[in-house]
Amino acid sequence: MFVVNKDELLENTKKRRFSESYDRYLSGYDAGINDVIQDILEMDCTSYDTLIHKNAVLNETYNHALEDIKNIKSEKTKVIAGYNDLWNAHREILGENKKLKSDISALRSKLEKLSEIEIGDKVEVIDCGEALPGYDIWLKNNAPTLLPLFVVNERPDNGESGVVLAIGNETLNGGRTEETIYAILNEKRKIRLITKKGVRLVQKHKA
């Protein structure tokens, strides 16, 4: 006669049911895991493609930036070269200007020398109001030999010309001004006294 052990049967039943439940759990777990992995793979692929695109854009931007930097460096080199050329030209111009100023100064001195009235030069009276017809004391002090040819209180006419025989400085107007005075022998053999402002140079004396 076959005897059934109830405890053992109950235990086996529990084990079978647990095994079935566990298998179902594993089956569902595997399916869930597969779905999650698939989602991750799809998500990663999309993200990877996006990253690849962004990287390509960044590389293109970087290459453009490198080209711009190269162009800027080239332009900078040209600007520096141009600046150096301008600076060298500026220095040359400064040197030329310095020489030109020196030449002009020398020429001005020469012109001033040429325009300066000296003894023996021919002059013309341009302002008879600058004459000193009563200043025979100047002749006594500076050119006494010319005194016999001096006519007191006789003024020259504008346009009258003559040769300078004596030159000297004198304080006039009560000591307020110092004037250069010329003793001029006109064509009538008369001595005229007149200040520098009253005559102009006509011809330099030939040495």
Image (cartoon, grey):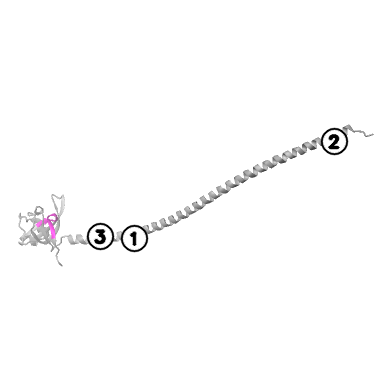
Tell me the kind of residue under disc 1. Answer: Glu
The furthest residue to the top? 6
Magenta-span inclusion, residue 157:
no
Magenta segment range?
Answer: 193-201
How much space separates mark 2 and mark 1, taking CA atoms? 115 Å
Q: Estimate the x, y position of residue 95 in percent, counting from the top left.
A: 32, 60
Q: Which mark is residue 12?
A: 2
Kind of element beneath mark 2? helix
Give the residue drawn at x 65%, y 43%: 40
Q: Estimate the x, y position of residue 185 in percent, counting from the top left.
A: 8, 61
100 vs 148, left or right, is right
Q: Estimate the x, y position of residue 108 in percent, counting from the top left.
A: 22, 59
| Depth order, front residue of 93/34 | 34
In which quadrant of the rendered image does the C terminus lie? Answer: bottom left
- The tag earlier along the polypeptide, 3 or 1, is 1
| Depth order, front residue of 157/33 | 33
Q: Which mark is residue 104?
A: 3
Q: Nearer the viewer, mark 2 or mark 1?
A: 2
| Depth order, front residue of 193/14 | 14
162 vs 49, left or right, is left
How much space separates mark 2 and mark 3, taking CA atoms? 131 Å
- The tag earlier along the polypeptide, 2 or 1, is 2
Report the magenta stretch's main SS: strand
Kind of element beneath mark 3? helix
204 vs 47, left or right, is left
Q: Which mark is residue 82?
A: none
Q: Estimate the x, y position of residue 54 in percent, counting from the top left.
A: 55, 47
- Look at mark 1 in the image and give the residue it sits on: 92
Magenta-span inclusion, residue 196:
yes
Q: Tell me, yes or no, whether the two marked residues, 2 and 3, touch with CB atoms within 8 Å.
A: no
How much space separates mark 3 and mark 1, taking CA atoms? 18 Å
